[in-house]
């Protein structure tokens, strides 16, 4: 990995308490070319040394996806380079190979982000099967909504993570979200937090920290319960956790405590958990080896799954 330039839009969306699709697409259009140029400069690489172009086809906001897909195919056409379109969900799993190149299937994966909470199995034949998913809110969405209830800034996940460090995770016995089988559900714990805040009316800083810590603990516990259940059923030798929520310090700590003795546990470095170019490149290398580059042109797919 020669460079991994990330341009965050958090500051643009913070005043609105969430991502505004039109603003996101416009910012993507304005910053994509400068980010590509900076990545080449950081890598000390010329265009003549580039062998191919990788791009996210989906899932995600269609405006942002269309910007990326069209720029990637334009570069491919102009430079006569092959283009590989990948799922950014699969890329969250494959990001683990950036730190452990010998990683191979079969393995269990937990992908947790603002829009997704999925349990997957990367099969021996290279395919990815979803064995559990959220029935309502994703874990990252639950963190963002919980942060708004607590009066914390956007993005909510990091804000709760910071505040929870000063709180007691056992202060409030929030319910552990449950759903059938290996699925997730986070709407109940979010509602429980809302009622708890309303009941208390004015919150001291310590009460707010205790609420954040207890709420975070409920979400983390629910995620790891499902991973433990899946591992008991699937007996996978390796477990990978990825996605933006995998930056959460409590999730990383609890995962080590609860899963490392069951299987080989891989959680990429925090900068490889949030959406980033390096994980798309890692996924593209795997896809390229399996099926080769994509026929051009191809379109973005905002509803794309893991394949």
Image: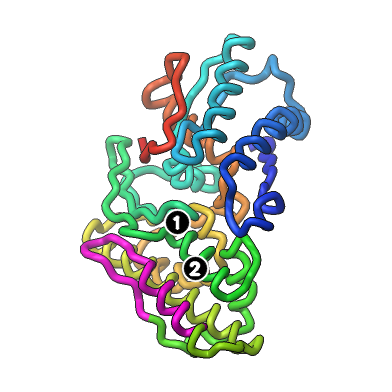
Quadrant including the C terminus: top left
- Relative to 259, does residue 268 appear above or below in the rendering? above
Please determine whether, in this image, residue 75 is positioned above or below residue 90: above
Query: Residue at 61% of width from left, 87% of height from top?
Result: 203
Residue 36 covered by magenta stretch = no
Q: Residue 112 has which mark?
A: 1
Check if mark 2's residue and mark 1's residue have beta carbons within 8 Å: yes
Cα distance in 3D space between marks 2 and 1: 11 Å
Q: Position of residue 3 (x, y in %)?
A: 69, 37
Give the number of the disc on residue 251: 2
Residue under the point 67% across and 47% down: 9
Q: Secondary structure at mark 1?
A: strand
Q: Residue at x 71, y 28 (%)?
A: 33
Does the magenta-highlighted stretch encompass residue 179?
yes
The relative height of residue 188 versus residue 4 in the rendered view (above or below) is: below
Q: Quadrant of residue 213?
A: bottom right
Mark nearer the viewer, 2 or 1: 1
**Residue 23 visible (yes or no):** yes
Q: Which of 293/164 is in front?
A: 164
Give the residues in magenta: 175-197
Q: Is residue 277 above or below residue 146?
A: above
Q: Secondary structure at mark 2?
A: helix
Mark 2 and mark 1 lie on one chain; the one further toward the N terminus is: 1
Q: Residue at x 41, y 86 (%)?
A: 173
Q: Nearer the viewer, residue 1 or 224?
A: 224
Q: Give left or right: position of 284 versus 79.
A: left
Q: 49 or 24, which lies in front?
A: 24
């Amino acid at each position: 990995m020669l460079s991994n330039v990330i341009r965050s839009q958090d500051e643009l969306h913070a005043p609105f308490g969430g991502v505004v699709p039109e603003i996101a697409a416009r910012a993507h259009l304005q910053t994509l070319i400068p980010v590509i140029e900076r990545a080449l400069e950081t890598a000390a690489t010329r265009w003549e040394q580039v062998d191919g172009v990788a791009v996210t086809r989906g899932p995600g906001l269609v405006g942002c996806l269309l910007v990326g897909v069209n720029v990637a195919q334009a570069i491919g056409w102009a430079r006569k380079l092959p283009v590989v379109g990948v799922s950014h969900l699969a890329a969250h799993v494959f990001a683990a190979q950036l730190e452990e190149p010998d990683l191979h299937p079969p393995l269990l994966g937990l992908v947790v982000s603002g829009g997704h909470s999925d349990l997957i199995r990367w099969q021996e034949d290279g395919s990815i099967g979803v064995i559990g998913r959220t029935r309502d809110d994703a874990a990252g969405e639950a963190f963002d909504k919980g942060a708004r209830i607590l009066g914390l800034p956007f993005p909510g996940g990091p804000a709760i993570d910071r505040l929870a460090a000063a709180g007691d995770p056992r202060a409030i016995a929030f319910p552990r979200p449950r759903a059938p089988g290996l699925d997730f559900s986070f709407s109940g714990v979010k509602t429980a937090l809302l009622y708890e805040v309303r009941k208390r009316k004015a919150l001291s800083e310590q009460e707010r920290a205790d609420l954040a810590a207890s709420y975070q603990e409920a979400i983390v516990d629910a995620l790891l319960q499902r991973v433990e259940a899946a591992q008991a059923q699937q007996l996978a030798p390796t477990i990978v956790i990825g996605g933006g929520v995998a930056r959460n310090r409590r999730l990383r700590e609890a995962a080590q405590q609860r899963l490392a003795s069951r299987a080989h546990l891989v959680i990429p470095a925090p900068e490889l958990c949030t959406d980033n170019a390096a994980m798309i490149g890692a996924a593209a290398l795997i896809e390229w080896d399996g099926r080769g580059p994509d026929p051009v042109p191809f379109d973005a797919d905002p509803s794309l799954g893991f394949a």
